[in-house]
Image (cartoon, rainbow, N blue to C red):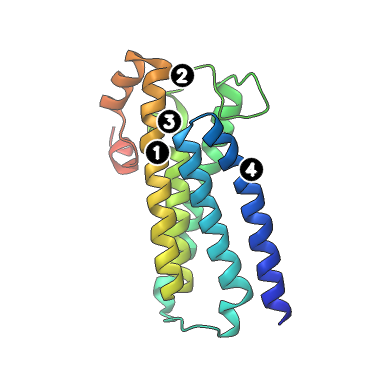
Amino acid sequence: MLATYLCIGICAINWIVNGIWIRQAVKERFASAIYLHIGLGVFFTMLALELTIGIRGAWTHLGISWLGLIGWILYVPSTILVFGSMIELKHKGKPKTADFTATTTFIDRGIYSLVRQPMTLGMAIWSVALVLVFQSILTIILGLISLFCFWMSARKESEYNIMKFGDIYKEYMEKVSMWNILKGLRK
């Protein structure tokens, strides 16, 4: 019973925080942030459900250990992508506010020379990793929803960046894939 209340509390906090960001993004008509925070909300709901209720046997898990191992391994590159992009944006993007994503400078070096949208790619990989680690119908459904939200966020962010940076971003799009990091590594 305590696990259920803990799950409800964690999910409530998760959606309050993401709801604030979603509301702000709706006001500013910033579609990529709307999708991003819905995806994060679904992802952290999925994580909270599995860690508080799912591991206590509330639903069936496949328990295929090699899939779980692949999931755990995927957390390494996804974490590098997410936090690497955050560091690049904060230090090279020259944001004028506390929001590190509000860059004033176009970035095409570092992790951004490999893939255009490393943050959303990392979050999408987190979703896949979580599905592989927990292996339940619930994580498959919520994982697909969050994966779709992160993909839509990346697409909308590219549209926004074309408006923000113009032709330089269009040229960058021709050279660097949105999510295909293997193509970026082959250069």
Q: Nearer the viewer, residue 13 or 65?
A: 13
Which amino acid is tagged 1? Ala
In the image, which is nearer the foreground, mark 3 or mark 2? 2
Percent x, y for residue 108?
Answer: 42, 23
Which amino acid is tagged 2? Phe
Dot 1: element: helix
Q: Residue furthest left?
A: 174
Which amino acid is tagged 4? Ile
Q: Residue furthest top?
A: 167
Q: Nearer the viewer, residue 137 or 92?
A: 137
Residue under numbered circle 2: 106
Percent x, y for residue 125?
Answer: 43, 53
Q: Are discs 1 and 2 less than 8 Å apart at CB?
A: no
Callout 4 environment at 10 Å: few (<14), some (14 to 19), or many (20+)? few
**Dot placed on the residue nearer the N-terminal end, 4 or 1:** 4
Which amino acid is tagged 3? Tyr
What numbered label is drawn on residue 20?
A: 4
Percent x, y for residue 23?
Answer: 58, 40
Instruction: Answer left or right for 163 relative to 100.
Output: left
Percent x, y for residue 74?
Answer: 45, 58
Instruction: Answer left or right for 38 relative to 173.
Output: right
**Dot placed on the residue nearer the N-terminal end, 3 or 1:** 3
Residue under numbered circle 3: 112
Q: Are discs 4 and 2 less than 8 Å apart at CB?
A: no
Dot 2: element: loop
Residue under numbered circle 1: 154
